Structure formats: structure tokens, C-alpha cells
Image (cartoon, rainbow, N blue to C red):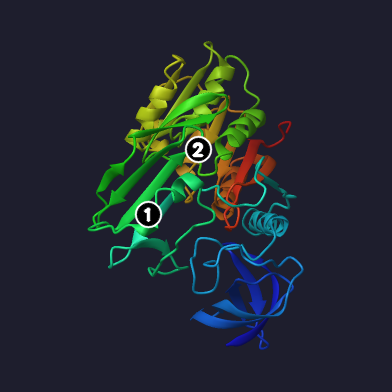
Amino acid sequence: MVELSVTGVAHGGWCVGREPGGRVVFVRHALPGEQVSARITEETATFARAETVDVLMASPDRVTPPCPYAKPGGCGGCDWQHASLAAQRRLKADVVGEQLRRIAGIDQPVTVEPVAGDQDGLGWRTRVRFTVGPDGAAGLLAHRSHEVVKVADCLIAHPLVEAAGVAAQHWESAASVEVAVSPAAGQRVVTTAGERGHRRRHSGPSHLRHVAAGRDWRVGAATFWQVHPGAADLLATAVADALCPVPGDVVLDLYCGAGLFAGTLAAAVGPHGTVIGVDTDRMAVRDARHNLQDFPWARVHVGEAAEALARGGWPPATLAVLDPPRTGVTRAVIERLVAPAALRRVAYVSCDPATLARDIAVFARLGWQLAGLRAFDIFPMTHHVECLAVLTRAGAPG
């Protein structure tokens, strides 16, 4: 056990504390400004990790976690239930700003915006993956552990997810159970996976119908879709506002998923424009082609982004959207994307501020600048934050 003075916040749901001897300790379930007693869980040559056991001096931002499992040794899904929502957003803004300064050398003011209609940060998660323990009971994992915590009710899960009753059932021969729902359509699909990853639809339709940007979208049970009910609509609008498309523009949507951004931008560029979507997931591409069938000037390709850019086969892009997985974008993708002189703006949607900052630094070395950044609290109670960075050629108007 150690006593820590907590001085700041770090990426990943940690706070930064120091032992009396000066060693840095990354501690969970604490808040900046607090004095805590913590249990060391991991040590390296330069730092340690710990979990708060007692709060000796509390921050005014501290609240009682609404979920009884959001505690040291409990479920690892929520990082900030012990902080008010306003404080959570300030902490996330601090993390994004720190990553940009440290990795990209950019001092950028950051405000994390709430999603419209989100009052208490609960009941929003429309896709939840449960891990099945050796006894056949499904639960959620403890932090940085394979230990299954039996959670009777997940408070951040959407009510349609909770209504599936996964935790109350026995799951023979399953390694995991995933529940995905569409609040707009009232649909739910439950999928199981075995030890080798083979997926089987347990119940529900093969596709969900989501609503965003004023229209319906077909999304397969395993296809990526934003997990907050308000996120897809918010991000579609934000990306369109960031890119300012006009009729005739040529738009690339890399990592396009079910085609949310491609479809939104196809309507803006019109039949004299071109929209090209690229994704490695064949099922997602099928959904995207279905969702874009009303736009003959939009095409979707299966493949790696770098390979698709090298191969080409479309007019030089004037606008681009990047919405990569948490690992970010490779340098090869960025180099090939910005090579055509016609490209004037890039909208980069990211769920990881560290890889976003890394990639912004690559853009900068290739003559591009950060022209704007927005951040959205589409994952309340967790450390995750969604960012939209707008990039333009250096010297170009923002």
C-alpha cells in the first residue's frame, strides 16, 4: 500500500500520482487533486500501476458511482463513474490536449462536447460483448485481466441490451456473447463465438436497421456501427460540416464500414461528383453497397486502404474521410492520400487520441496542418473519447 498525491490525468483512464519518494504511479479510481491510499498492482523499472483503496482527501468532482461494479477489483468497462459528467469531459479534454502537445507538438484548445439528449451518461451502449467463464456464466472483464466479473445489470448498456438477459443464462460451449441493438427499430441480435472465434447468430435478424442523417442504414450484426445512439447522426453532420463538400467533389471514404460518411457525402457532391469507399471487411462492404445503391456515383471497394490508393482507378480526390480502427493510419496510407495536389481537406475521425496525434504529426511532416478539432463524449463513464480532426495543406485557409 502507498499514499499518493494525485496531480493529473493520463491516457487510458489513469490518474498520475507520486509516492513520497517521487516515483510516478498511474492509479485508477482517483481524481486529480486527491490524496489516496492505493494498492500497487504492477511495477516496472520507472513507474508503477495501482488501484485506489481509500480516498484520504476527495476532489469536489468526486461522486458516488451509480454502478456497484465500478470499483477497484470490479468491472473494467467504466473508468470515470466516480467523477461527475462535467469533470469526465474536462479530464478527456486534458488527455486529448496532452497527447497533441507531447506527440504532435501542437497546442490545441480542446472542449469535449456532450451528445444531445445524454443527461446522465447511462443506458447508451448499443453493442456489448460479454465474456463467458468456465462455469458457462457471462459477465464483463475486470481491468487488464481475463477474470470474468458477473454483472447482473450493466448501467451503461442500452435497455434493449439488458432485456436480452445474457447474464441470467447459461452459455454452453461459448467463449463470448455479443448483443447488438437498434433503438430506432427496436431490433436486437445476439451472437455467440466459440474459443476459435467462430460466430453463430443465436437470435434476432441478420441485419439491424439504424437511422442517421435523415435516412435508414442496413448494418450487419458484425459490422461496425457507432455504439452511442446519437453518435452516427452527430458525426455524419460534423464530418459534412468539416469538409464543406460541393457538387462535383471527389470524396474518398477510407475505412468506410457500412457507408455512413460515404452516403452522407454522396448526397452533397451529387451526380457530377464521385464517392469511393474502401474497407477490408467484406460484410461491411456489402452493407455499404446496399446503403449507397441510390447513388450511382458512389462505389465501394474491398481491400486495404494503402493498396486501394496505390491502385486508384478514380479521379484525383478533393476531399477525404479517415475513420480507422484504434490503431490509426499507416504512414503509407497518409503519403499516398496526400500525394494528389487536388486534395484540399481531410476529416480524420478517431477514437484514440494517441494514434490521432501520431498521425497528425505525419501529416505535418508532409506539409499539412491541423485546421480544427472537435471532441465528443460518445462513451460516457469510460476514458474513451471521439475526435474529429480537420487537416488542410499548410498555408491553406482553415
Q: Is residue 40 left or right of residue 396?
A: left
The N terminus: image quadrant: bottom right
Identify the amino acid type marked 2.
Pro
Residue 340 in view here: yes
Residue position marked by numbered label 2 in the rendering:
183
Q: Is residue 374 left or right of residue 216?
A: right
In this picture, is 73 found above or below 100? below
Q: Residues within 10 Å of mark 1 (few under 14, many from 20)?
A: many
Residue position marked by numbered label 1 in the rendering:
166
Tell me how far mark 1 sits from mark 2, CA to CA.
18 Å
The x and y percentages for residue 16 are: 65, 72
Q: Quadrant of residue 81?
A: bottom right
Which residue is pictured at 55% across the width and 45% down the height? 350
Q: Is residue 297 left or right of residue 319?
A: left
Residue 158: mark in rendering: none
In this picture, is 18 found above or below 350? below
Q: Residue furthest top?
A: 272
Which residue is pictured at 62% across the width and 22% down the height? 245
> Tag 2, which secondary structure?
loop
> Tag 1, which secondary structure?
helix
Which residue is pictured at 41% across the width and 66% down the height? 150
Please count the marks in the image: 2
The x and y percentages for residue 107 are: 73, 53
The x and y percentages for residue 378 are: 59, 47
